[in-house]
Image (cartoon, coloured by chain):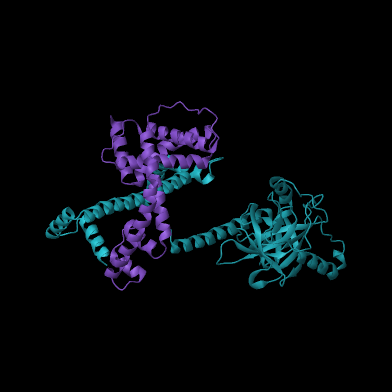
């Protein structure tokens, strides 16, 4: 029972991007995943990529309101990594027909679908932001990503006052929205 | 412009910054205008997109940092051997508690012991140190007094003569020629004592105060010449950093000391001597300075008063010069010959000393 509450606490920490919790989960699980990837035609770099991808999937899952993890963190991560790795192997044509590793797995297909969809959205956002050009990109990043104060932004970018900066921000935001949704709708 | 105002209103509405009246008005507007309602929904979704995007960047950043940290600490291993740093850190992490406990226990014990030592011993500070110096003077006097008595017994020192100073010297010719420092030879004569405590009468045959070197000749029936001297006297200068050792008589017993050659000139740039790093005491004066092969490279002469371990040695090539001077002074010394064969190279230090100690003498100068 104690293990359960411990894992709940860790997941709560992960949901809030608490590096201490992330570190504990990372330390407890990474080596197992690395061994699995290495034993199945993977490299150290690929092991890291796959594991971090799985961590992000778990992070996203922990953000949802209805979040409950019905298995151990270890099992979940292993299942996600195994699934991701199989897919990767198939994509690059390295798949030899069987994957070693006999750990217990749970169904993660649905979660991975959501995860992939979000990844696609992030790619669109990334592309939209990058095609905005400066100073729009930095202005929006400052406001929405770094959560900077409008006054500070005005000072940093050299606007005479916060209102002007705000106006400019909205103009940029409208352009970003246009760019994003054009891609997004195509994606749909 | 209208779009911007609208966007601002929507953002304020979504973030809950509106006043209740404004909020009510805006909600009413949403209800009646489907386009605005649509815009609100769309913008809300977009803001969520940005927030998620931002969170995604941040979690990636965290994961990257955590990975690097664990890698540095050696908790993760990415290929090949663990980095030594990682191993050390892992080791440290594993044992830091043990180490901390050990260190604090050690610290407590150390404090306790030093406390005890402080309690039982009188404090050591400068005046005390000076007293120690005085004590040494007293000891020296006692030694001199004892020396007098012994000398009376063996009667190698003439009657009524008083011991004035002491130092060391070493054989340069088996016939009984001994090189020592000129400054030791106060008074009228000297006796020499070998490492076995046997005394021999000697006479001063040459004294050079500029080079601070002197030559004694043993004139004693009891003296039995040894077969050969195992060392040569170096003619060339030695190099910095060369390992050296000495044998001498800072006390009534032969004492060994080790050090290195620290400068090619002596005190205030004196080119006749070397600076050497060795612990030298009064009585070491006149003693030989050997290199690691057991060859004589100098004669230990003085030490700097204020500095610890800094001593000076007259370069050995000066011995060659004074031997030449000696030969010129009298035909009786024509047959003086410096040793030309070194037999101690590559020999273990203990064996070297064993051979050498027979050639190093305690020089005692006396006067009326």
- In this orientation, does residue B274 appear? yes
**Residue B337 percent coordinates (x, y):** 84, 60
* Residue at left offset 40%, top offset 56%: A128
Q: Is residue B340 above or below residue A121?
A: below
* Residue at left offset 81%, top offset 67%: B326
Which colour represents chain B?
cyan
B76, B339: nearer the viewer: B76
Position of the C terminus of chain A, as image quadrant, is top left
Left/right of residue B42 with respect to residue A84 in the rendered view: left
- In this orientation, does residue B116 appear? no
Q: Which chain is purple?
A: A
**Residue B52 percent coordinates (x, y):** 33, 49
Left/right of residue A96 with respect to residue A114 in the rendered view: right
* Residue at left offset 29%, top offset 70%: A164
**Residue B115 percent coordinates (x, y):** 37, 50
A37, A172: nearer the viewer: A172
For residue B20, which quarter of the picture? bottom left
Q: Is residue B69 above or below residue B213?
A: above
Q: State the residue lying farthest toward the left.
A: B21
Position of the N terminus of chain A, as image quadrant, is top left
A75, B286: nearer the viewer: A75
For residue B28, which quarter of the picture? bottom left
Left/right of residue B314 with respect to residue B224 in the rendered view: left
* Residue at left offset 59%, top offset 67%: B304
């Amino acid at each position: 029972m104690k293990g359960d509450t411990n894992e709940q606490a860790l997941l709560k920490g992960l949901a809030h991007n608490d590096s201490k919790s992330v570190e504990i989960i990372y330390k407890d699980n990474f080596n197992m995943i690395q061994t699995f990837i290495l034993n199945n035609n993977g490299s150290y770099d690929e092991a890291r990529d796959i594991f971090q991808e799985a961590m992000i999937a778990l992070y996203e899952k922990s953000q949802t309101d209805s979040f409950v993890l019905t298995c151990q963190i270890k099992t979940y991560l292993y299942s996600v990594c195994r699934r991701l790795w199989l897919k990767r192997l198939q994509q690059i044509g390295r798949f030899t027909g069987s994957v070693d590793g006999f750990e217990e797995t749970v169904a993660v297909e649905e979660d991975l679908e959501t995860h992939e969809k979000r990844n696609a959205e992030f790619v669109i956002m990334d592309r939209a932001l990058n095609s905005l050009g400066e100073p729009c990109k930095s202005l929006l990043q400052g406001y929405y990503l770094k959560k900077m104060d409008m006054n500070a932004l005005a000072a940093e970018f050299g606007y005479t006052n916060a209102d002007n900066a705000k106006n400019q921000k909205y103009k940029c935001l409208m352009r970003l929205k246009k760019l994003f949704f054009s891609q997004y709708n195509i994606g749909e | 412009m209208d779009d911007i105002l609208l966007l601002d209103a929507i953002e304020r509405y979504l973030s809950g910054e509106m006043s209740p009246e404004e909020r009510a008005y805006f909600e009413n507007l949403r209800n009646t205008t489907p386009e605005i309602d649509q815009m609100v929904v769309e913008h809300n979704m977009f803001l969520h997109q940005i927030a998620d995007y931002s969170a995604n960047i941040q979690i990636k950043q965290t994961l990257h940092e955590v990975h690097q940290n664990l890698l540095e600490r050696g908790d993760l291993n990415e290929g090949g051997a663990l980095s030594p740093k990682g191993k050390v850190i892992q080791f440290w992490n594993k044992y830091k508690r043990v180490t901390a406990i050990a260190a604090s226990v050690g610290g407590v014990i150390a404090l306790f012991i030093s406390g005890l030592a402080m309690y039982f011993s009188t404090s050591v500070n400068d005046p005390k140190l000076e007293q120690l110096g005085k004590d040494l003077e007293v000891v020296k006097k006692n030694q001199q007094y004892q020396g007098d008595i012994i000398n009376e017994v063996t009667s190698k020192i003439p009657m009524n003569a008083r011991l004035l100073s002491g130092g060391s010297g070493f054989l340069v010719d088996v016939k009984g020629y001994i090189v020592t420092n000129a400054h030791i030879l106060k008074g009228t004569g000297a006796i020499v004592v070998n490492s076995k405590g046997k005394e021999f009468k000697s006479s001063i045959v040459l004294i050079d105060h500029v080079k601070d070197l002197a030559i004694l000749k043993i004139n004693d029936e009891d003296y039995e010449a040894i077969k050969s001297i195992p060392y040569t006297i170096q003619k060339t200068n030695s190099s910095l950093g060369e390992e050296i050792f000495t044998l001498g008589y800072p006390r009534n017993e032969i004492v060994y000391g080790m050090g290195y050659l620290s400068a090619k000139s002596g005190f205030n740039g004196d080119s006749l001597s070397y600076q050497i790093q060795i612990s030298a005491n009064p009585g070491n004066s006149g003693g030989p300075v050997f290199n690691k092969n057991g060859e004589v490279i100098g004669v230990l002469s003085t030490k700097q008063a204020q500095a610890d371990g800094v001593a000076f040695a007259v370069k050995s090539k000066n011995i060659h010069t004074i031997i030449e001077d000696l030969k010129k002074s009298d035909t009786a010394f024509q047959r003086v010959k410096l040793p030309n064969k070194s037999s101690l190279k590559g020999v273990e230090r203990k064996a070297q000393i064993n051979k050498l100690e027979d050639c190093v003498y305690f020089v005692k100068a006396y006067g009326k």
